[in-house]
Image (spheres, grey):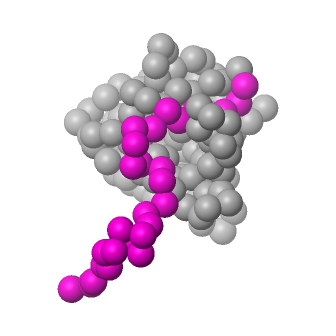
Amino acid sequence: MTWVRLGTVVRAVSLDGRVGVAGTEGAVARMSRVSLRGPGGVEEERAVLGAGPQGRVWWVRLEGVGDRSAAEALRGREVWGRREEMGEPGEGRHFWTDLQGMAVVTTAGLSLGRVEELYVTGGVDVLVVRGPAGERLVPLAPWVTVDREQGRVVVDAPPGLLEEEDEEGRGTERTRT
């Protein structure tokens, strides 16, 4: 059983004890139980009684949280769920937890490294790939394919995206202002 981080409790969203969870796009609604993890190793499991979108957060009703004070007491806790309960993300979609640690290669077979982080930009999310040539930022654009069967991300990048800049060869020099 694999636990994955789904988001963070950021506030109480009602008088009846619902909490607002940021950082999730709905996976929390698929959970039967979640683990709430706080500072100092505090961890407790609670049943999820209901969940739904509310603005920029998801409201979640948790077992044993019956009023606003109890919901406020959970602020700052990380919300973790079982990956097995998340199901499949759908055609052309991916859960961040599934991409983390995947090998990244070009269509020519050149290893670029492994996915270490994800930047959510509001437009096209960007993979942070660390490998032999250092860190690279790879947008999750149409020319990037996630091959979950092979456990890798394949990049068919447009010219100029992955090549190292050769400023001396072009007779140019960068200056910082």
Per the image, is 169 magenta?
yes
- The total number of labels drawn is 0
Indicate the position of residue 96 as horizontal and vertical percent values. 54, 38
* Residue 111 left/right relative to 9: right
The residue located at (39%, 33%) in the rendering is: 141
* Residue 123 left/right relative to 166: left
Indicate the position of residue 120 as horizontal and vertical percent values. 38, 47
**Is residue 71 in view?**
no
Indicate the position of residue 118 as horizontal and vertical percent values. 48, 49
The residue located at (43%, 63%) in the rendering is: 165
Indicate the position of residue 140 as horizontal and vertical percent values. 43, 37
**Is residue 170 in view?**
yes
Per the image, is 160 magenta?
yes
Residue at the extreme right of the image, as rendered: 1
The residue located at (63%, 24%) in the rendering is: 147
The residue located at (41%, 48%) in the rendering is: 161
Task: Judge by depth and name the residue closer to the eye, 110 or 121.
Answer: 110
Q: Is residue 167 above or below residue 86?
A: below
* Residue 53 left/right relative to 109: left
Instruction: Determine the main secondary structure of the stretch shown in magenta.
Output: loop
- Give residue 176's quadrant in the image: bottom left
What's drawn in magenta, residue-wise? 150-177
Q: Is residue 166 above or below residue 107?
A: below
Quarter of the figure with the N terminus: top right
Q: Is residue 69 above or below residue 63?
A: below
- Give residue 22's quadrant in the image: top left
